[in-house]
Image: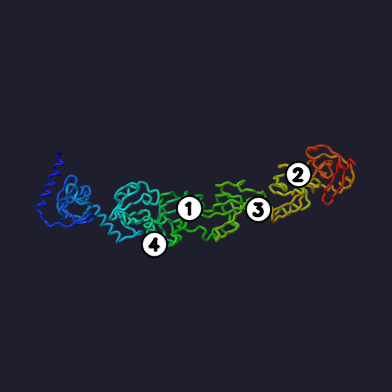
């Protein structure tokens, strides 16, 4: 016989002797009853309980581990599980008694949707068990809002939970920590929002950074610090000023308690540099500043921290046609300019760089008059004409229609080259709008009166094909003089391919069939040469 078995037998004998000694009157017991029990004896694995019945109760010692210094005579409620086992003992459970009593108390006090405090007892498959008076189940999906990590760190903590389900037949409860967290956050938000005042300073933690601003935790409420409220000066991204985890002091600009939104400001901690701006930068003042941004329409120049002026592309030069400010300026350049206008309400200052020098156009009208012939150099070509430099940096414009008396020019590049020197005539001077109209063809005599005399109707001539189109052939009759052979005047069938029948550069015999002085066109025919 083992030592443990002998000890258990001795305890049972002791119980029998006590029973004999008591000689008491016994109560009636049924399975499912909850009765008061008293510790009679403590064994290695089990504890024997006096139930006030003819037989004693037995309970595993593991159920009583939470009782400190368990001793004979201790009393507590137990649940009758089964009557008299093979050893004549009644199986009882303290845990089930507590659960039954706890369920009765909780079901009488709480309902689904209520919040209850409980202590996280242990981890089980699929979640955690929480002691709320009885053991309630907390599913893993309802532990936290998101990205919580290891649920083991909750074990032993006393927290607030929401009752999401109560199963009366099974007497079990399902709780949610996630819903309780939301409630706690809303409570904190409401409290913080109730304390906020517009214009006050608050410290907060930079929680997130986006392209449009920074989210700052004010102690339970997130506020938005928009990029436009971070600095009076220009910044490209909020990360230039703050980093995640920084503690910053901000100004409460406004807040919406109903929607729990808070707008914050950082630049508002200092005085607006645009205050009294008209007196700081009167119109006509010469200033120096740094180019901080360049756009297709102009360059922004920083005059002081938070104050920028715009030099429009048209205000960069009196004489040079500037298509893009980047052609003459770069970010970081220091430039001198003149204040042209100031709008404090819109926080706009217009600057001019060209105004630093005298306006040469004031003398242009006196110097150049219509009909004057001058020498120039082709500066730039466009689809509709050419810019010609006629003196220094002064440019005039030759429209495509003013390039030749006789030749149809589809693109100025066919007629002129960049850098080419040419003689031009002044057609008009508009000093106010800084424009000079020039003519190339006007430096020569209009030849059409002589052309009409030379090219009579029916005249047979020889020319060179210059262009083949879907509607006919262009034929050069002499330098810069072309005529058109319409497809109807060609010796070709209805399905004839002109590009197979004729080649550019070929000599061809034609007959003049029309000379239009008004439209300055000559019509030719090949068909009539064979009649």
Dot 3: element:
loop
Given residues 139 and 430, the one toward you in this image is: 139
Mark 1 and mark 2: span between their CA atoms? Answer: 58 Å
Please name whichever residue, 491 or 378, is drawn nearer the observer in this view of the structure: 491
Could you say which disc has been placed on residue 358 in the image? Answer: 3
Instruction: Identify residue for label 1.
Output: 213
- Image-based side of 256 in relation to 443, left or right: left
Image quarter of the N terminus? top left
Tell me, for residue 53, which label it has, or none. Answer: none
Comparing marks 1 and 2, which lies closer to the viewer? Answer: 1
Percent position (x, y) of residue 136? Answer: 31, 53
- Whichever of labels 4 and 1 marks the residue nearer the N terminus, that label is 4
Residue labelled with disc 2: 422
Query: Is there any visible trace of residue 278 in the rendered image?
Result: no
**In front of the other: 399 or 87:** 87
Q: Earlier in the sequence, mark 1 or mark 2?
A: 1
Residue at image mark 4: 195
């Amino acid at each position: 016989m083992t030592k443990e078995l002998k000890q258990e037998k001795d305890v049972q004998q002791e119980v029998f002797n006590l029973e004999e000694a008591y000689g008491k009157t016994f109560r009636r017991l049924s399975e499912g009853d909850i009765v008061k029990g008293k510790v009679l004896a403590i064994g290695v694995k089990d504890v024997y309980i006096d139930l006030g019945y003819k037989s004693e109760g037995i309970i595993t010692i593991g159920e009583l581990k939470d009782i400190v210094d368990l001793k004979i005579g201790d009393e507590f409620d137990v649940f009758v599980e089964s009557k008299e086992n093979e050893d004549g003992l009644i199986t009882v459970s303290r845990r089930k008694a507590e659960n039954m009593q706890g369920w009765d108390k909780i079901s009488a006090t709480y309902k689904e949707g209520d919040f209850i405090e409980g202590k996280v007892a242990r981890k089980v498959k699929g979640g955690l068990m929480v002691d709320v008076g009885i053991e309630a189940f907390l599913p893993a999906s309802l532990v936290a809002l998101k990205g919580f990590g290891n649920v083991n760190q909750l074990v032993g903590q006393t927290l607030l939970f929401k009752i999401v389900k109560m199963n009366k037949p099974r007497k079990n409860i399902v709780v949610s920590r996630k819903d309780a967290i939301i409630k706690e956050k809303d409570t904190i938000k409401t409290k913080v929002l109730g304390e906020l005042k517009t214009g006050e300073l608050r410290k907060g933690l930079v929680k997130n950074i986006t392209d449009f601003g920074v989210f700052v935790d004010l102690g339970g409420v997130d506020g938005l610090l928009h990029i436009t409220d971070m600095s009076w000066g220009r910044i490209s991204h909020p990360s230039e000023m703050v980093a995640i985890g920084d503690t910053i002091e901000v100004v409460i600009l406004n807040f919406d308690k109903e929607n729990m939104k808070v707008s914050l400001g950082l630049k508002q901690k200092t005085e607006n540099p645009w205050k009294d701006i008209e007196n700081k930068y009167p119109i006509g003042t010469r200033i120096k500043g740094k180019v901080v941004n360049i756009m297709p329409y102009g360059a922004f120049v920083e005059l002081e921290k938070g104050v920028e002026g715009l030099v429009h592309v048209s205000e960069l030069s009196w004489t040079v046609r500037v298509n893009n400010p980047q052609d003459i300026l770069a970010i970081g350049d220091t430039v001198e300019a003149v204040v042209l206008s100031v709008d404090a309400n819109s926080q706009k200052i217009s600057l001019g760089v060209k105004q630093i020098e005298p306006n040469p156009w004031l003398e242009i009208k006196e110097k150049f008059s219509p009909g004057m012939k001058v020498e120039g150099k082709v500066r730039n070509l466009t689809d509709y004409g050419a810019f010609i430099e006629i003196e220094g940096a002064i440019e005039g414009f030759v429209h495509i229609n003013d390039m030749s008396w006789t030749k149809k020019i589809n693109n100025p590049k066919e007629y002129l080259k960049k850098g080419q020197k040419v003689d031009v005539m002044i057609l008009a001077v508009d000093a106010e709008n800084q424009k000079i109209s020039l003519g190339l063809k006007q430096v020569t005599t209009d030849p059409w009166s002589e052309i009409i005399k030379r090219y009579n109707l029916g005249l047979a001539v020889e020319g060179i094909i210059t262009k083949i189109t879907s509607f006919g052939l262009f034929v050069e009759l002499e330098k810069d003089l072309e005529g058109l052979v319409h497809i109807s005047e060609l010796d070709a069938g209805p399905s004839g391919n002109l590009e197979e029948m004729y080649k550019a550069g070929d000599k061809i015999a034609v007959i003049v069939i029309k000379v239009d002085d008004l439209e300055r066109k000559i019509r030719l025919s090949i068909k009539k040469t064979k009649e």
